[in-house]
Image (tube, rainbow, N blue to C red):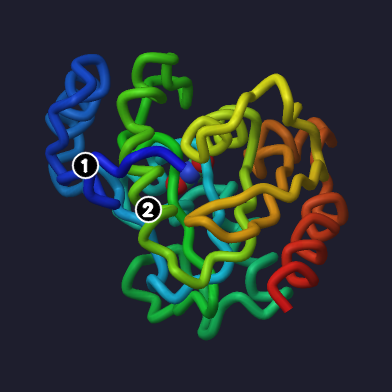
Amino acid sequence: MKKITAAPEAPRDCPLCPRLVAYREAVQAKEPTWFNGAVPSFGKDNAELLIVGLAPGVTGANRTGRPFTGDWAGDLLYATLDKFGFSEGTFAADPNDGLKLTGAMITNAVRCVPPENKPVGAEINQCRPFLEARIASLPKLKVILCLGKISHDSTLRALGLKVAQYPFGHGTKYEVAANGKPVTLLSSYHCSRYNTNTGRLTPEMFEAVFAEARKAVA
Ligand code: URA
């Protein structure tokens, strides 16, 4: 684990990535009622499971201010969290729906919305200290579940591990260490609309990874 150099949450008006700031401001000019800021993680610090997404979707988390809330990726993610007992309440795609995560937290590798859902390497690197701090803030952490390769690789780097030694794949499982304790690192294809529409990721495949996560926190 690397030395922690940031807070676990970026300030809403985080200035670190010029391209992301410009995009955020352009969206804000068109949609002034949207959240339009660095989206904070969702869940409590007693989480045993940390889910690491990619980055806020422009009409999803960037609009609502809660990770995976308001777009297709979230509909599948929150339904699956419910199925495996990681949430309480009813998800209504709205941060005011009263949904609570139980033993889980959701964060993103990149906290601000990137154009076309594609952060560049410099932005992923710039945002990593927040991920490192987020991981360090979870004393009960047992499982990290990464959604997609960018999340997987950035999480490995946050843990001080070499990407080449832990290749990404759907359903990969590695025993690693975080905060000086053993942690299971699971990965899944990202639950994006593209991946589910093309059949690259089916709900059954996604659930199989969550079944592993449930087993590993039990
Ligand atoms: N919304 C998020 O917050 N993260 C993603 O990776 C996708 C959608």
**Mark 1: amino acid:** Gly
Q: In the image, is 207 to the left or to the right of 30?
A: right
Picture quadrant of residue 37: top left
Label at residue 163: none
Q: Residues within 10 Å of mark 2 (few under 14, many from 20)?
A: many
Where in the figure is residue 178, as x and y percent of width and height?
A: 54, 52
State the residue at coordinates (39%, 55%): 136
Q: How many marks?
A: 2
Per the image, label 1 sits on a secondary structure element best described as loop
Where in the figure is residue 143, as x and y percent of width and height?
A: 64, 60
Give above or below for 198 relative to 60. above
In the rendered image, the quadrant that contains the C terminus is bottom right
Where in the figure is residue 64, as x and y percent of width and height?
A: 32, 54
Where in the figure is residue 171, as x and y percent of width and height?
A: 82, 45
Q: Residues within 10 Å of mark 1 (few under 14, many from 20)?
A: many
Q: Is mark 2 within 8 Å of ligand 1?
A: no
**Nearest the eye: 120 or 31:** 120
Q: In the image, is 109 to the left or to the right of 166?
A: left
Picture quadrant of residue 16: top left
Closer to the observer: label 2 or label 1? 2
**Mark 2: amino acid:** Arg
Residue assigned mark 1: 37
State the residue at coordinates (47%, 21%): 118
Per the image, label 2 sits on a secondary structure element best described as helix
State the residue at coordinates (38%, 71%): 45
**What is the distance, in whole Å, between disc 2 and disc 1 at their CAs?**
18 Å
Q: Sequence-wise, which precedes: disc 2 or disc 1? A: 1
State the residue at coordinates (51%, 30%): 157
**Nearest the eye: 7 or 74:** 7
Label at residue 134: 2
**Nearest the eye: 74 or 5:** 5
